[in-house]
Image (cartoon, rainbow, N blue to C red):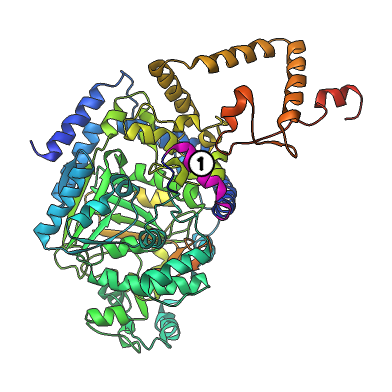
Amino acid sequence: MNGLDALMASVKRAVAARDGRRTPPPAHEPAIVREPVAGELSDRFLSEVADAGMHGERVKAEDVVTRCGEIVKDATGGVITEPALLEAHPELGDLAGLVADPDEDALYAAEVGLVLASAGIAETGSVAHQSGMMNSRSAALLPMTAVAIVHASTLVDDVYGWFAELDAETLASEIVLITGPSKSADIGMRLVTGVHGPGVVHVLLVTDR
Amino acid sequence: MTGSTFRERVCDALSDERARRAVMTATAEREERRRARWAELADVEGLRNIAAEIKQHTLDHLDAHLARFIEKLEELGVTVHGAADAAEAGRAVVEIAERHGCRSIAKSKSMLSEELDLNEIVERAGLEIVETDLGEFLLQLDGDRPSHITAPAVHKDVESCAKTFAEGLGVPVEREPKKIVAQARAHLRDVFRGADMGITGANLGVAESGTIALVMNEGNGRFCVHRPKAHVVVMGIEKVVPTLKDAAVIVKLLARSATAQKMTVDTHLITGPMRTGEPDGAEAMHVILVDAGRTRILAGAQRDALNCIRCGACLNVCPVYRTLGGHAYGGTYPGPIGKVLTGLLEDDPTCELPHASSLCNACRDVCPVKIDLPGMLVQLRQQQAKETGRPRGKLFVLRAMMWVMKSPMRYRMGQRIARLMMRIMGRKGWVTKGVGPVRGWTKGGRDIQTLPRKAFRDLWRKGRIG
């Protein structure tokens, strides 16, 4: 018997040894588990983005490239992105400083990473980024500055609602709900940002596409 | 913190003024912020009830949910291992390293790995392992141990952190936390880049999708699965929940209770290794499911202790933890949950931690999954009393107190006698050295304030109050 079979046998024994009480799975009352958002989703989303310590703003689709250009203009170490974002906004391909096909050194040297969010959550200001053939974990993680492009059509009300829409059979290998810059209070309980991941996070909410 | 008995460790803790101040401030602040966060939820009581029922239900059918979890993981190409104890878990990690040719490991924070002393086992096998959570990294450099579940270095102030980094990394001493963090960031970047294995814990395992959920603020968990040859998850069997919606309920409560955030910076869902055509991720993924005493607890009377989601809220609110800090407890888990878990995990029915509580119930009131910790502490005390026999001296004193308290006149008399005795024994308003039957009580640093000269009831009667 291998370790896993032995473990499962002990679990079975322990479950069987318990008293007769067997709690059924609880009902998830929407009035309890959901956090309804009053008013405009995008207003609440941007206010929560700011609350979480990120820089949020509304941007028109045609202005995305200009705005990204302003954010990356001092990034002498280079800018990295992912194919999914370039597909949604092809004009970003001409961005100054963009490193095409970065090798590992270029990934680690990059100062700004641009990524396409798969969703935004109004309740908490969270931005979802997922892995995939067209996505780059590196672009969302390695540079000190991260820029997440969130399309308004992907906004959802709340965390529970976001989870409820996931399909257990088709989940990406990685999804990160990003809510703020990387931070720690481990040194003398004083808050510092940019510990391992991005220390500055821009959230561009694209409103008309 | 080298005391070998609980009493010695308590004395050590009480004499460390600097650590006490740090812990007191940090816990009070966190507790206040947690309260405000909870109040923002639509129905926090309802949510706590659902969370508690999710955990109850899962543990009542743990065999079925674990079987489903394992099946999903294997479908995703994850290799699943079972470990009965620390030695088996350590062996599994070493074998995985051999199989994939890994030599250096970047590790993110995991309380279970602390419990198992995993680093020591892995290092003995000749592998290099680096803690990458800032607080844990600091403690690793120092040869120290975490003293809080979610703020491992809460007992250290800026100055001692600065010294540790400067000595450990051979860099200049910095006074500013921001600069100290920059030193650590630069150093740990190289660690991540050079590591060929990443080890993480798991805040949750979702049975229906085979997902591992990690909540984190620094981002190191994402680095551990960024591009290693192998990602190894070390998780306790009690961490599984049936569905993604169940995970959502726990996530909502976890960040708010642990660090008073609506969401932690990273809520990280990992579903299998990197897939074909993806540019980055772990090439292979392994999950080690660990028992280490959990099935024994599951079958026992304190099974609800397994409901714990490790938020640490009960530590922050506990008057004993706030005074002592975490090291005095001597186990991996300090505070109220540690008082219950330590003896159970170590299968030590004589563990004295259940007695280190005033049973004030604060921990029960803040537990997001409503674990009745005070009730369990009483149960554990009763079990101990049954097994070891009741101490006669204590029983005599308790009976005498009962007799005194049953009559108002005897109670008044008792108060007078106590006031007089304390005045005789006390120095500057404090009794630090008892005589006769209370000598043992004050042994080892315990003190008590003397009763005031006049009792409230006397002042009231004379009209001096009100």
Q: Which residue is mark 1?
A: B10
- Is residue B185 visible in the rendered image? The answer is yes
Q: Camera-side residue: B430 or B137?
A: B430
Q: Residue at x 30, y 29 (%)?
A: B298
User: What percent of the width, then of the height, locates residue B253?
Assistant: 45, 45
Task: Name the chain letter of the residue that bears numbered label 1.
Answer: B
User: What percent of the width, then of the height, locates residue B267?
Assistant: 37, 56
Q: Residue at x 77, y 15 (%)?
A: B413
Q: Which residues are magenta?
A: B5-18
Q: Check disc 1 and give the amino acid type.
A: Val
Q: Residue at x 31, y 32 (%)?
A: B59
Q: In the rendered view, would you say B194 is above or below B328?
A: below
Q: In the rendered view, would you say B135 is above or below B352?
A: below
Q: Secondary structure at mark 1?
A: helix
| Horizontal side of residue B154 vs B466, given as left or right | left
Which image quarter is the C terminus of chain B in? top right
| Residue B282 lies in the magenta stretch | no
Q: Camera-side residue: A176 or B377?
A: B377
Q: Main secondary structure of the magenta part?
A: helix
| Residue B7 lies in the magenta stretch | yes
User: What percent of the width, then of the height, locates residue B416?
Assistant: 77, 20
